[in-house]
Amino acid sequence: MGKGPGLYSDIGKLAKDLLTKDYNSDQKLTVKSYSTTGVALTSTALKKGGLSTGDVAALYKYKNTLIDVKLDTASTINTTLTFTDLFPSTKTKVSFKLPDYNSGKLELQYFHDHATITSVATLKQSPILDVSATFGTPTAAFGAEAGYDTKSGQFTKYNTGISFTKSDSSASVIIGDKGDSIKVSYLHHLDQLKKSAAVVDITRRFSANQNTITVGGSFAIDPLTQAKVRFNNYGKVGGLLQHEIFPKSVLTISGEVDTKALDKNPKFGLAIDLKP
């Protein structure tokens, strides 16, 4: 764990990642390589339904600056510039998308031993401002975030959360959707190497009078193979198998079935990530 409390987006992230990360219903191939000049190149091909897309990304680090450029099959160029310590204890990100000249975004993160503050501004004619702050330590943190639309003069969001983290477990409570929902999650590691874990997530949506309970786990079958499983009280069951076919290269097979609607086709996803 680091010195500070982390970003607001880190609250509940471990449990969320275990339940959602790497699950997909598409076919995806990713190939990564490195040039002699130190540029990291990533090529991605994605088939979603009957539509196939792809992109090529280049990542280059020069001193304290990270340059990330991505070109996709829709002729869209995404560029992100990340400056570390442009100001003391800060990280600054500038991103924009061409030919959409109104897509610019400026993000500033400030890190302190007991506080982290993030501000994001979309550089449009009527900017939207997002601000989040987290206070505490790596073991106990309290945070809040808010978004404000300068054109309408209204808040687009306001949420708050608290987290508790130990070496073998983490718990969080998040009040989101402008106070309309509360999410409680708990993750517990089952071994010292943190290869296996169990998680429970309970979400209450007040306006819909609806509760969603999701239980999941991650288990190491062997040093090269990881399995995940999840299910909720609405009958949806998902599973994932991840295997390191070569060093740093991973094959992921995932799927989900709705046990209360077996007439529907189950979701199936396949991803191959090749690294040198």
Image (tube, grey):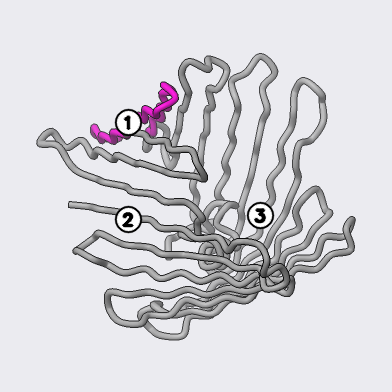
Magenta region, main secondary structure: strand
What segment is highlighted magenta in the picture? 57-83
Residue mark closest to the camera, 2 vs 1 = 2
x and y percentages locating residue 101 in the rendered image: 53, 15
Element marked by disc 2: strand
Element marked by disc 1: strand
How many labels sit on residues? 3
Q: Is residue 208 above or below residue 73?
A: below
Q: Nearer the viewer, residue 109 or 194?
A: 194
Mark 2 and mark 1 lie on one chain; the one further toward the N terminus is 1
What type is the residue that disc 1 sits on?
Ile
Residue 258's quadrant in the figure?
bottom right
Mark 1 and mark 3 lie on one chain; the one further toward the N terminus is 1
Q: Nearer the viewer, residue 114 or 133?
A: 133
Give the alpha-carbon distance from disc 1 to disc 3, as whole Å: 30 Å
x and y percentages locating residue 4 in the rendered image: 49, 57
What type is the residue that disc 2 sits on?
Ile
Residue mark closest to the camera, 2 vs 3 = 2
Element marked by disc 3: strand
Query: Which residue is denoted by mark 1 in the rendering?
Result: 67
Query: Which residue is denoted by mark 3 in the rendering?
Result: 143
Query: Which residue is denoted by mark 2 in the rendering?
Result: 272
